Amino acid sequence: MDLKHLGKKGAPAPEPTKPPVKETALYNEKDAYAAIIRSKILDEDIIVLKDKKMLKKLQEEHPGVVIYSPAEINEMERFKGDHDAIRKIHNAKKMFEGRLHKNNRRYL
């Protein structure tokens, strides 16, 4: 699959309904934790969600913001320093509303 078109510009995303966060915003709801983080590499917000309990709520409150599990973030560590690869993976995840997988294991 050719993903060259997902470079720096990336796939068109829904217009955010909220302004970008200036710093990390934390959510804690019944032992379900999430953080909204402004990514300097991606120049947009991402959400890191520990538990699926808050998934639907965060998707509704932050449409168009890509949500990662901690395991997905750990997988992205392989590309540390390769900002272009990180952008391509992120944009593919956003465009296909997908999840990162490893050894047929879904992370979120």
Image (cartoon, grey):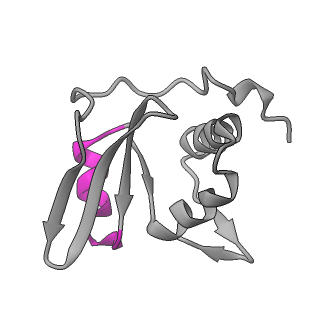
Q: Is residue 34 above or below residue 79?
A: below
Which residue shows up at 61% across the image and 26% down it? 10
Residue span colored magenta: 50-63
* Residue 46 locus on image (x, y percent): 39, 45
Which residue shows up at 19% across the image and 79% down it? 31
* Main secondary structure type of the part rendered in magenta: helix
Q: Residue furthest front?
A: 81
Q: Is residue 23 above or below residue 12?
A: below
Residue 108 visible somewhere in the drawing: no
Q: Is residue 19 above or below residue 52?
A: above
Please state, as top left, top right, bottom left or bottom right, where the N terminus lies in the image.
top right
Q: Is residue 68 above or below residue 45?
A: below
Residue 1 visible somewhere in the drawing: yes
* Residue 57 locus on image (x, y percent): 23, 56
* Residue 35 locus on image (x, y percent): 28, 56
Residue 7 lies in the magenta stretch: no
Which residue shows up at 64% across the image and 37% down it? 83
Given residues 76 and 58, the one toward you in this image is: 76
Which residue shows up at 14% across the image and 70% down it? 29
Given residues 21 and 105, the one toward you in this image is: 21
